[in-house]
Amino acid sequence: MMGRTANDDRSDSMNPNNDAYDDSMDNHSNQLNPNNDAYQGAPDDDGKED
């Protein structure tokens, strides 16, 4: 019997009827939320503050 593949995980996270979908959307929102500690924003051009 074969194990799960990366494609299986992707299918789960793209399926709105799967719990992994909600987890994936939560993670996506956290990364785009500037009030979240995980948010890093866009990279600077020169590395200096404006």
Image (cartoon, helix red, strand yellow):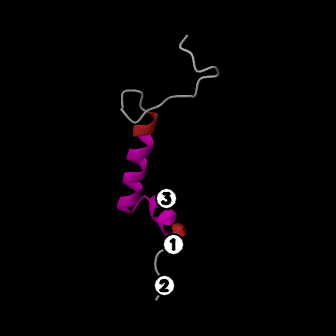
Asked which secondary structure carries label 3, the reply is helix
Mark 1 vs 3: CB contact within 8 A: no
Residue, disc 3: 14
What is the distance, in whole Å, between disc 1 and disc 3 at their CAs?
15 Å
Q: Position of residue 49 (x, y in %)?
A: 53, 14
Q: Where residue 13 appears, x then y in whole percent?
A: 45, 59
Residue position for label 1: 5
Q: Amino acid at mark 3?
A: Met
Residue furthest toward the right? 45
Q: Which is more N-terminal, label 3 or label 1?
A: 1
From the top left corner, tell me how far across and down residue 27 is, in percent.
40, 46
Which one is in front in this view, the residue at disc 1 or the one at disc 3? 1
Q: Secondary structure at mark 1?
A: loop
Q: The C terminus appears in which quarter of the rendering?
A: top right
Which segment is the magenta one?
Answer: 8-29
Residue that label 2 marks: 2
Which circle's residue, 2 or 3, is located before the other in the chain? 2
Q: Residue at x 54, y 68 (%)?
A: 7
